[in-house]
């Protein structure tokens, strides 16, 4: 009996909360006791043990729905209605995705030369807000609502299902966010092309503005988005256009040298008029797209996948959602394939394209699809929450941005440092400082030779191969040095 219990315990995977995004407020689980005190509808689904601890039956879909709606109201001041036959979103995962997007936008702003900043309160020429696109927003419209309430972003939400679209629109209206979130009904199989490039969509989205500070509905997490990242979340397109304008300005100055007299005459008035026109007529560009595509290609596949997860134990929460939300032709890989293809056509309208990946077995195929599109930069990440893992992909065609610099907490915790093993024959003095000086000498030498970054990489690769030519493997090198009675020198960083 004890052995059976032990096996059952081992079948339940450990919680992954320690790998959640550092700014995710749900790294500390919410207090069910406080929720039960504030929300009678939540209390109706709770039970109490002899110690007074509150328990929730996660196998009851209505209990899960009430938990989500109560948390949305308590923590973000959002009143959300989720129809009984539609998907109930889990908030820790949604926030992990949005916080990762915030990190990507902040990095992009820095790399583009804007220093991550928007205008200050007194800046009359502050850049426009971040504008994102949620593809397949669902009945709860949870991503746009959180993006508006927690990050002060503006959002375009698209949906193919009429029932879910109407519910999403009602949730936006209920929270008085029509000026910050636009909901559009689109045809089936419409992802990017046929909606983001339509003039009427651009007109609708360009009118969106975040509501002023303090204009929200309350909630204890409304203002808890990191101040360090908040300034970086300002639209980095403004920073990029500033860099571009600076380069164009240099060319204009050279042309103006030939006509200095005309320049002096029109300097007082024309300069100010051009500045106003530039601010007003700047082309509109979306900052990012996001999507949580249906995972499965058929209901049979969804049922089979739920039953075939080895070593995962039974699901801890009841499944929710309609077939429309869980199933799409070809599954999530085909959905993402179409999205990647369309992203190449809209590379000038969207800064960063992203998607959630629901199944680990699909990650490798999605990587291949993204890399085949030859973006200037791409990155893949893991979202950890509770006992559930999801994966994310992001890519951009914008120059000068390395999205791979944004790493997940799990990746940073599990990634081993680079270890370079030096055989004794390479150095006259055999020590760690001598090994480090050797590496610095190679790097300085490659810099002095000039050439492109690619040429430097090739040179470093050849030098690395030279080391490997002297010793077949690190283990063999270590064995050789031990035979001579001297431990191998290692450099680690």
Image (cartoon, rainbow, N blue to C red):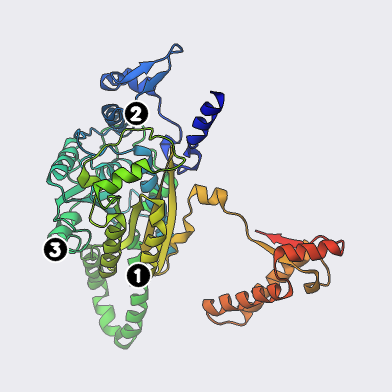
Q: What kind of element bears circle 1?
A: loop
| Quarter of the figure with residue 69 | top left
Label located before the other in sequence (2 or 1): 2
Q: CA distance from mark 2 to mark 1?
A: 41 Å
Tag in front: 2 or 1: 2
Looking at the rendered structure, which numbered label has been put on residue 199?
A: 3
Q: Residue furthest bottom?
A: 258
Q: Nearer the viewer, residue 124 or 186?
A: 186
Q: Residue furthest front?
A: 1
CA neighbours of label 1 inside 10 A, class few (<14), some (14 to 19), many (20+): some
Q: Nearer the viewer, residue 331 or 257?
A: 331
Whole-percent x, y for residue 124 in the image:
29, 54
Q: Is residue 77 left or right of residue 92?
A: left
Read off the residue under disc 2: 58
Whole-percent x, y for residue 166 in the image:
13, 42
The structure residue drawn at horizontal position 73% and vertical position 71%, both measured from the top left corner, is 471
Quadrant of the image containing the C terminus: bottom right
């Amino acid at each position: 009996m004890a052995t059976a219990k032990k096996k059952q315990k081992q079948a339940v995977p450990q919680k992954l909360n320690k790998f959640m995004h550092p700014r995710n407020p749900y790294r500390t689980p919410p207090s069910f006791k406080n929720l039960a005190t504030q929300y009678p509808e939540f209390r109706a689904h709770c039970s109490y043990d002899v110690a007074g601890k509150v328990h929730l039956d996660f196998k009851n879909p209505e209990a899960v729905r009430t938990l989500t709606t109560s948390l949305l109201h308590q923590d973000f001041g959002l009143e959300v209605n989720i129809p009984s036959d539609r998907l109930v979103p889990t908030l820790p995962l949604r926030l992990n995705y949005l916080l990762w997007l915030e990190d990507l936008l902040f990095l992009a702003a820095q790399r583009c030369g804007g220093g991550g900043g928007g205008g200050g309160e007194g800046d009359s020429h502050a850049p426009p807000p971040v504008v994102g696109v949620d593809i397949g927003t669902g009945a709860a419209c949870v991503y746009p609502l959180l993006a508006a309430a927690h990050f002060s972003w503006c959002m375009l939400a698209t949906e193919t299902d009429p029932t879910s679209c109407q519910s999403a629109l009602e949730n936006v209206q209920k929270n008085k966010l029509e000026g910050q979130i636009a909901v559009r009904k689109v045809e089936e199989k419409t992802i990017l092309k046929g909606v983001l490039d339509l003039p009427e969509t651009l007109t609708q989205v360009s009118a969106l503005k975040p509501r002023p500070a303090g204009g929200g509905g309350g909630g204890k997490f409304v203002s808890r988005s990191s101040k360090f990242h908040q300034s970086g979340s300002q639209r980095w397109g403004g920073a990029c256009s500033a860099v571009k304008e600076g380069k164009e300005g240099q060319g204009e100055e050279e042309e103006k040298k030939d006509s200095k007299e005309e320049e002096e005459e029109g300097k007082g008035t024309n300069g100010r008029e051009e500045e106003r026109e530039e601010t007003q007529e700047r082309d509109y560009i979306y900052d990012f797209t996001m999507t949580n595509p249906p995972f499965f290609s058929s209901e049979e596949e969804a049922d089979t996948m739920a039953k075939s997860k080895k070593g995962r134990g039974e699901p801890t929460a009841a499944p929710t959602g309609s077939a429309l939300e869980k199933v799409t032709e070809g599954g999530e890989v085909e959905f993402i394939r179409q999205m990647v293809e369309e992203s190449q056509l809209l590379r000038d309208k969207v800064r960063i394209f992203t998607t959630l990946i629901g199944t680990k077995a699909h990650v490798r195929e999605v990587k291949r699809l993204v890399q085949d599109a030859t973006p200037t930069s791409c990155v893949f990440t893991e979202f950890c929450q509770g006992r559930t893992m999801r994966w994310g992909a992001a890519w951009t065609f914008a120059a000068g941005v390395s999205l791979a610099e944004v790493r997940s907490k799990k990746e940073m915790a599990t990634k081993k440092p680079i270890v370079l093993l030096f055989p004794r024959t390479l150095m006259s003095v055999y020590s760690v400082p001598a090994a480090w000086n050797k590496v610095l000498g190679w790097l300085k030498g490659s810099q002095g030779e000039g050439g492109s970054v690619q040429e430097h990489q090739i040179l470093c690769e050849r030098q690395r191969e030279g080391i490997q030519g002297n010793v077949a493997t690190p283990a063999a090198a270590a064995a050789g040095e031990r035979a001579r009675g001297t431990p191998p020198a290692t450099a680690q960083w």
